[in-house]
Image (tube, helix red, strand yellow):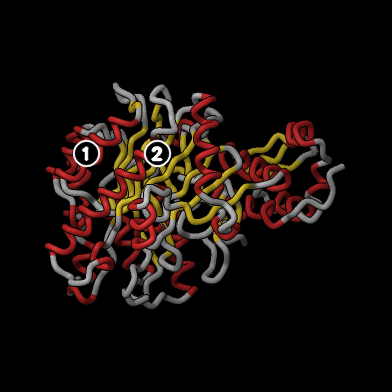
Amino acid sequence: MLDFFPQPGEPVARCDQGVLDPNCHADTQKFHPGIGSLDLLRAVRISRQKRRPLSLNVQLPANLKSYCTTPDAQSEQAALEQYLEHLKREIDLVGCHLSPEQRVEQFHLAGGTPSIAHLKQLMNHLRRRFHFLEHECGDYSAEVDLRHTDWAIMGALREQGFNHVSIGVPDIDAECEMSVACYQNPAPINSLIDAARTFGFRSVNVDLGFGHAWQTPDSFAAKLKTIIELEPDRLMVFDYARPPRRYRPMIGDKVRALCSQEDKGAMRQVCFEQLIAAGYHYIGMGQFVRPDDDLAIAQERGRLRRTCDGFTRHGFCDHIGFGLGAISQIDDLYTQNTDEIERYQRQLGNDQLPTSRGWRFESGEQIRHTVTERLACDLELDIRSIERRYGLVFPRYFASVWPRLEQLSRDGLIELSDRFISILPAGRPEVDVICHLFEKERGSARH
């Protein structure tokens, strides 16, 4: 049986880019320091010339204590102020090479939850530089920390044009004397979901991790049940062995123990049993959505895409990242900022972009990219279309994959012919691993 979540120590299989770093949705294992700020600026200028729409991603620091010499509120406030000043400088350095006519169709605010004052300051600066859409035409999302977000902040986010919100469920922290009973308490999450509904957010996502040593299949099932009862539009379920960026241990934090593989496998099974029974659709890589969600509708209409920011309805945008470790994606170029705050601030202080590495994929990688993205997003692949587009014979090019596809067909997970690959309902939980088969294949022949 295929495993829908990767095991510890394995590369992460993402549907659009292949073997991915757990930090993001791009293949950062291939990034190298030979790509720098000049490459990014050339790509940005091409974006300006072609007047492409934009997808912006702003990274705020999730834990400022890691950057403070003294762990107190005053030091954290000063550190945030300093970070925001450098962030605005980066926005100016990149934004001056883009056209004000380029629409921002997608925007994501990631990392820490800012105060209302800092949020307004940041958004005012962005709006002076970029063309944000009105009348709910764009997808503007924000990550919020359950422990540092209240109704006032939710209202401020909505006033600033955000229409999607992702709520992080905190891990139990022994130092804070949080108990399992507190972990199971749905009231704080319920309060923020109520706020999102009241203020008219288009969708609410809840992030939920599993796999820590203190968790059991029963405790996880109980937690998931309480979340389902709150009826969020989306749930992102992730393995604590490789959590999303904002849940990764910060510098100086202790790495917590994980539960057994047997218990982890049982928790994975609970995800599908409970969420599918509750009417959620599995999109891929831990993302479950309601059937009327924008992502589910986009998938049904063949308009779902995967980019460096994950699943989106706006796959034809150029993606620009700002902040520590932020990733940009324009055409075949990926660039990433440094994740060292001293270097980030030093370079911007010298009016230099903080680009530290990147990657430009080649023709063979483009083929695998297209195959895995379309199979993941459409749940089917037009083989003849791929053959015409790239001038290859599909079974020969993916010679080592084809026998495995035939086995999956016999197992009832996919439907396979010389014209199409279709993922059947029984195979949807395994869509990530099915797509990953093509990423392992380097193409044995082109004809």
Residue 261 lies, in percent from the top left, at 49, 73
Foreground of the two, 250 or 292: 250
The reply, left or right, for residue 446 in relation to residue 111 is right
Q: Amino acid at mark 2?
A: Leu
Quadrant in which the N terminus appears = bottom right
Q: CA distance from mark 1 to mark 2?
A: 16 Å
Q: Nearer the viewer, residue 131 or 305?
A: 131
Secondary structure category for the residue under label 1: helix
Residue at (69% x, 57% y) in the render: 440
Q: Residue at x 38, y 25 (%)?
A: 100
Residue 211 position (above or below residue 387) = below
Label tally: 2
Does the rendering let one see residue 273? Answer: no
Residue visible at 49% across and 32% down in the picture:
317
Secondary structure beneath disc 2?
strand
394 or 392, which lies in front? Answer: 392
- Taking depth in this image into account, of 43 and 303 the one nearest to the observer is 43
Residue holding disc 1: 157
Q: Quadrant of residue 162?
A: top left
| Quadrant hosting residue 68 | bottom left
Q: Which mark is residue 56?
A: 2
Residue plotted at (53% across, 51% down):
36
Q: Residues within 10 Å of mark 2 (few under 14, many from 20)?
A: many
> Does any portion of residue 339 appear in the rendered image?
yes
* Percent x, y of residue 52: 50, 27
Q: Badge 1, how many Cα within 10 Å: few under 14, some, many 20+?
A: many
Q: As drawn, is 275 to the left or to the right of 45?
A: left
- The mark that comes first in sequence, 1 or 2, is 2
Q: Position of residue 272 (x, y in %)?
A: 46, 54
323 versus 296 height, above or below? below
Q: Given contact means CB atoms under 8 Å apart, are the residues at marks 1 and 2 in contact?
A: no
Type of amino acid under label 1: Leu
